[in-house]
Image (cartoon, coloured by chain):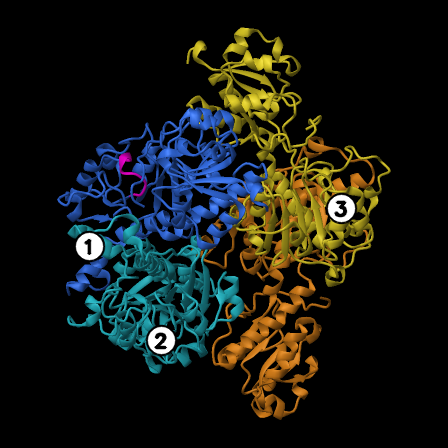
Chain colours: A yellow, B orange, C blue, D cyan
């Protein structure tokens, strides 16, 4: 392809870098197919009109105003290489013009689901404390150490939020012959059924589960959705696994429910990150801690580049993007999320 | 059923008890259907000829000699409520007479498989050490803590031994889209294929796997099967998960391979149980310890009674037992196992 | 809900009727939730401004012009209760305003997939001719009649087009342990892989398959896609099953390929429907005929109403529709389809 | 291997031939590993003592008496390359000596299951009559021709007999999200559950199914099991598919139930084979006929040789055979079957 015909891409993926989100092979392909202009995300407007006038794609989620958008007449998509949608561009204009805003958070679904399953199995079998006891020579052997052990196989499982994470979780749970219920007010019941889970109200998911997984994104409507009442409704000894955003739960209430022995819990997310050194959850028995490690695997980030390339290739052929997730007019304002500062 | 018509069962499940292996409902059913004579396992011969002459089933694995067997003309099955087969009865006589010797170790397959999967995920994601670091305020956040993290999804997995445990493991792995190879010299290749795994030589399983699970029983032929050579052949950084019997591996060689950082490992079984307090594996980094806890769940033991009842019901109708596993003429002498002393 | 608060729906589903597409229960629900104004599809403009001014949804696919659309300020969605998109409304305006145009053709996926599988099995086993021979007393017994019989299990299967139909087909094929390749230029390869099929070029699908299923919609780009060349490339004796639209193939070339014995074929669609009485395909050996019967089951039509209700309920809560398929800005003009005249 | 060390096999597979049941590759392997002595099945006793004294395996199901068996001291297995067990050898002696009697009927499971599914789909969609009407120019188009059409997806399905055929059927049905119940008095309920089907009494299977598949072998207990009563209990319009042996049903009652329009039916087996030319089932509407074609595929027969080789290889290593099905002491006398005369 001659230089002139290669479409122009503005690259502004900060705080991420192209090297983080593309494998070397994919990066080479990106450069072969496109002219890539690296840009300061804080100053897209500073790019010349020649660049803006030709740009077909933006990789990243830089702030954009209406004026700048108007100088981007050929823009077809903003591929934001994140899970979230910041409130830093006039989405209505983008939707009106048919410019897709695409997120790639799907890449985290598999690693998060695997960690979530691991957490559930760890709580069910007390693996961490058993290993510590073994190190200290305090271990109990055989059945004696299994008084509260239980199985996922044949259990009742609840999933709160059935987006990409929920579906990935459902997939890794598929070998356990468990009864899986899902609560997701943004999805029709029949779609949940098609995925092989039972649609259920939140109340049922809380009261009828041995394991509850929270994989819902925080929205303007579900902040603090799960509080003291919710935890009190759970089965005694059930396990609560929090994987998406701390904002969905009242964290103090969660700690209290574990503290009084009503439930077990595991969490990958916390109200403050890093968490203060004196936070009581650090030493809380019955609680398994993970420092926002669920999704942030190199192998996951590297899939973002593949997704971006696949969707740009479709759009280059005047087809709609099918791989990344599109921001939706109806929901873009409800997604509450903070910019990532670390990966 | 009148008293006379209820078939007679000799109960000698020590060291286990009927209460351990039957739920209350199943135990009531046992007593409703059968006359149950409790016996001292060490003195079956001491039972009167009237009892022996009528006994249709023995629950347990008591020592039996030819004379006693001759006094048991109506015996149809010995349901040993264990995984192993002791060398304490004349099996040839039993086989000749068509008396089934049935084991119920299948009940452990599900709990062992779940723990095995948990161990693999723990090694892959460093969950125990991450929780400890979090307790101590030394935790790393996000990607920084995931430098060596990896996924089961899409990985290559090897299973050594494809009996009940191997099949249960394969089932809980079914949601991971992994490439699963199995080595089992006692099974035809086509049967492994029918189960959805690739039959492979031991060499391939060792060299081509990211995760190796050992679920083979110890036999007279595979004692110490996996030694220094085997571990050296494994991929650097691969995980070795030992679930069946320590006798299958050269444990010192395993420890050495982990110590020098070549592989990670987890084990539920040890050369001595309990393990000496000064054994180096207790503090070995890269090793996850479990004190023979994989199968010994109450919920597993309680399934034994159900299996026993189902198979006795079939035999009462002159049908072959289909639920428990039958001792086989060809292999009974090859199974090397110690009596259980604790559950 | 008071009369005033029930949202207004314009009903113009002709040639279909609400009774065809709603179960009695669903229809009752529709009327309970919404004010339903029946309209002549040819004269939506003739509805008063009061009706148009309040209408939130249109059920059906009536012609609409820009003026009428302007008189529909609260319109959120046109639920067209068909598979196709007619070129009878200014889609650009609709997209700009964020009015969803929704199709419900998904309901046909399951019945079409089942018929497609049945056709493949019929061709593989010669079921129709065997039954006819049996009626006439000419049947061959056992192996003698199976000279050209073959299995789907373990075969190589190609699917052309991997939309709802392709996915449904893949699902009903899941028990056959076949190697399934799919060709779909509108989808990224990774999405096909996620569905468990191998993405493949058309050439490979044609040359490497024992069974080829065509479930692609006709677009402006694929009309007559499969001609004499394509059929010549197929394996000798392979089966070609046409399920979507006759326009995708050169029908005369298909007939010729079957006539000369190179392939077997089955089709549910024909270049003219009804087909002339003297068309040679009517008596062509090696060809299984179905008169556009694949999808048109009552049970399928009745699901349309459920889909419509589920998506309207989401939109009523200001959420995006998730059940029906949305017309896409990029592809709406490429879909070539005729209005349905009969169901 | 030197001549002396190659184990000796007596080959007497008539009416089948080694060429039918072995692929060329497998046959070469057989001859490489074993000395193969072809024998007249009617005169095994006529073989010299040298041959009999060394024979390890017999391929086929020739008549054997006690004397001949005594002259076969090293015999380990009779691999009968059929589905049935004839009453032509002293099984008690064989069981006492631990000589395995192995059947290979499993090879038919897949082809029978595929035909069974095809039959069910044919009945559900009226495919044969629709094709005939199309040939004659009498076809109805679209929904008009689908008045009685229905789906397997989401239906209730009953399977009578859950041996190899039942399991293969369950597998090809796995993509249909149907509710599958199975009745098999020879299997414990928990084993059916493990296979993912609901164990159910015969009554429930008959009354609660839209499709009933009969894949039970005839035994001394189930001859004529399904008669007028059974068919009367079935749902109006349900489909009855007979795949195993005609002896399980009262065929006249089946014909009558179809004749009066209560059920639809398909059958691969008939009370007499070949069936008299004037039998009324030949022209019975609502009945799909197949002349014992379900299993007799070359590809199936050729798998027998593979199974035989795999199990002989295990027995050569003093391991039990795991691939073929073993005759069981308890049931061998209950299997009622006629010798095959044609394949």
The label number, if any, that marks residue D226 in the structure image: 2
Regarding mark 3 in the picture, which secondary structure is present there? loop
Residue C186 horizontal/vertical position (percent): 41, 31
Label 3, on which residue?
A227
Tell me which segment is drawn in magenta: C242-248
Q: Nearer the viewer, mark 2 or mark 3?
A: 3
Residue C24 horizontal/vertical position (percent): 45, 54
**Disc 1 crowd, CA 10 A, few/some/many (<14, 14-19, 20+):** many
Earlier residue among tags 2 and 1: 1
Mark 2 and mark 1: span between their CA atoms? 31 Å
Label 1, on which residue?
D132
**x 62%, y 77%: residue:** B59
Residue B164 horizontal/vertical position (percent): 56, 60
Is residue B298 placed above or below C257 in the rendered structure?
below
Label 2 close to label 1 by CB (< 8 Å): no
Mark yes or no: residue B86 visible. no
Regarding mark 2 in the picture, which secondary structure is present there? loop
Q: Is residue D225 left or right of residue C325?
A: left
* Chain bearing mark 1: D
* Chain bearing mark 3: A
């Amino acid at each position: 392809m001659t230089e002139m015909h290669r479409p122009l891409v503005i690259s502004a993926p900060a705080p991420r870098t192209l090297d983080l989100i593309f494998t070397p092979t994919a990066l080479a392909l990106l450069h072969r197919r496109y002219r890539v202009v690296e840009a300061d995300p804080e100053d897209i407007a500073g790019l010349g009109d020649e660049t803006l006038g030709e740009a077909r794609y933006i990789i990243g989620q830089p702030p954009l105003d209406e004026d700048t958008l108007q100088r981007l007449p050929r823009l077809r998509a903003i591929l934001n290489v994140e899970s979230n949608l910041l409130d830093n561009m006039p989405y209505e204009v983008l939707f009106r013009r048919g410019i897709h805003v695409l997120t790639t958070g799907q890449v985290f679904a598999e690693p998060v689901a695997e960690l979530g399953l691991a957490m559930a199995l760890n709580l069910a079998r007390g693996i961490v404390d058993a290993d510590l006891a073994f190190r200290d020579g305090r271990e109990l052997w055989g059945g004696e150490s299994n008084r509260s052990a239980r199985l996922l196989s044949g259990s009742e499982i609840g999933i709160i939020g059935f987006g990409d994470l929920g579906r990935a979780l459902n997939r890794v749970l598929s070998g356990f012959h468990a009864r899986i219920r899902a609560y997701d007010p943004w999805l029709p019941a029949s779609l949940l059924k098609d995925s092989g889970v039972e649609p259920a109200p939140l109340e049922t998911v809380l009261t009828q589960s041995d394991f509850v997984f929270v994989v819902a994104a925080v929205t303007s409507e579900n902040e603090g959705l799960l509080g003291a009442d919710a935890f009190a409704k759970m089965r005694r000894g059930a396990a609560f696994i929090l994987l998406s955003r701390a904002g969905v739960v009242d964290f103090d209430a969660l700690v209290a429910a574990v503290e009084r022995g009503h439930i077990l819990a595991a969490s990958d997310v916390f109200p403050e990150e890093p968490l203060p050194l004196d936070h009581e959850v650090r030493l809380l028995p019955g609680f398994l801690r993970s420092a926002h490690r669920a999704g942030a695997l190199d192998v996951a980030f590297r899939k973002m580049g593949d997704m971006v390339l696949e969707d740009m290739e479709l759009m280059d052929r005047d087809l709609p993007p099918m791989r990344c997730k599109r921001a939706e007019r109806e929901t873009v304002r409800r997604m509450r999320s903070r910019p990532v500062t670390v990966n």
